[in-house]
Structure formats: structure tokens, C-alpha cells
Amino acid sequence: MNKPLVLVGIGQALAVGVAVWGQLSAATTGTEVRLVTAPVDPMDPFRGAYVQVGYETLDALHPDDSGSSQVYVSLRRDGDVWTATSVANDRPASGTYLACENNYGRLDCGIDSWFVSERTASQFESGKKFVAVIKVDRWGHTHLVEVRER
């Protein structure tokens, strides 16, 4: 067996593992969190049927727009949904939070696209309120489970 080829294969397998670790960790060990959302843009001729998910309380936060950096969004449970309460540059010592990228004042938490069938895409154009069910692990990694009517 060719030893360099085996090492390359192991390296590639490790790279894939590192790339999906955050979402996999959130999906398997995360706490379920429900955020109120306002889905927009349910159809794109190039990407197909998907919902661009906007979050009311996340969109209300305004991190500085000086560049790109890792930030943490603290969450608080408010009845059956959760609310984003603040954004900080330092990881919170406790509580549930999202690890996000601050891209020049826009938060990217990895939960902004939801792919749907063309048959169900039209329901997101109705103006109804929806809730996004996400899972958040202890490091703030996220996994979008579903978007459903509230």
C-alpha cells in the first residue's frame, strides 16, 4: 500500500471532519431554541426554492461595522421563543449564545438559509409569522432544524 496516499486520505478525512464539526456538534448535542423569523425571498432561479431567513431580534442588534470578527449573541428565553439580547466580542461565561461572524455590521450566525421544495416555497410568501427551530451547542455553534408557522 502506498503510504503517502494513505496519509493524504487521512488528512482529507480530518479536514472534512473539522469543516462539519460545528454543525454536527450543534445538531447532536445542542439545546433547541426557537427564534421568531420573517422569511423572505423564497425563490431564486439560480439556487432553487429556499427561504432567506431573517430574525427579528438578531436584526435589531447593531454590532460595530468596522470589519469582520467573531462575536457572540446572548439569548434569553421569552415564553416559547428566545430573544437575542446583546452582542459582545467576548464569549459569555454562561447562558445560551450564538457564535456569529460580524461582517461589517451584519451578523452571520450560519442559520440564514432554509431549502424547501418548490411546492412549499409559496407558503413563505404569505406574510405570516414563522419560527425557526435551531439547535445551539455549548460553544454557540448552530444548526437550523426547520422553519415553521408560528
Image: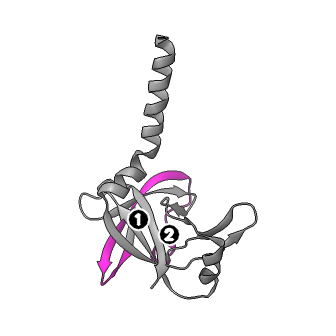
Residue 51 pos. (x, y %) = 60, 71
Residues 138 and 88: in front is 138
Q: Residue 67 colored magenta? A: yes
Residue at the farthest left position? 94
Residue 53 vs 72, above or below: the answer is: below
Q: Is residue 96 left or right of residue 24?
A: left
Q: Residue at x 25, y 64 (%)?
A: 95
SS at circle 1: strand
Mark 2, other Cα within 10 Å: few <14 / some 14–19 / many ≥20 = few
Q: Is residue 98 left or right of residue 51?
A: left
Quadrant (top left, top right, bottom left, bottom right) of the C terminus: bottom left
Residue 99 pos. (x, y %) = 40, 56
Answer with the quarter of the image where residue 100 lies: bottom left
Residue 142 pos. (x, y %) = 41, 59
Q: CA distance from mark 2 to mark 1?
A: 8 Å
Q: Residue at x 39, y 61 (%)?
A: 98
Residues 94 and 109: in front is 109
Residue placed under numbered mark 2 in the picture: 62
Residue 77 vs 17, above or below: the answer is: below
Residue 87 image label: 1
The magenta stretch is 56-84
Q: Residue at x 43, y 39 (%)?
A: 18
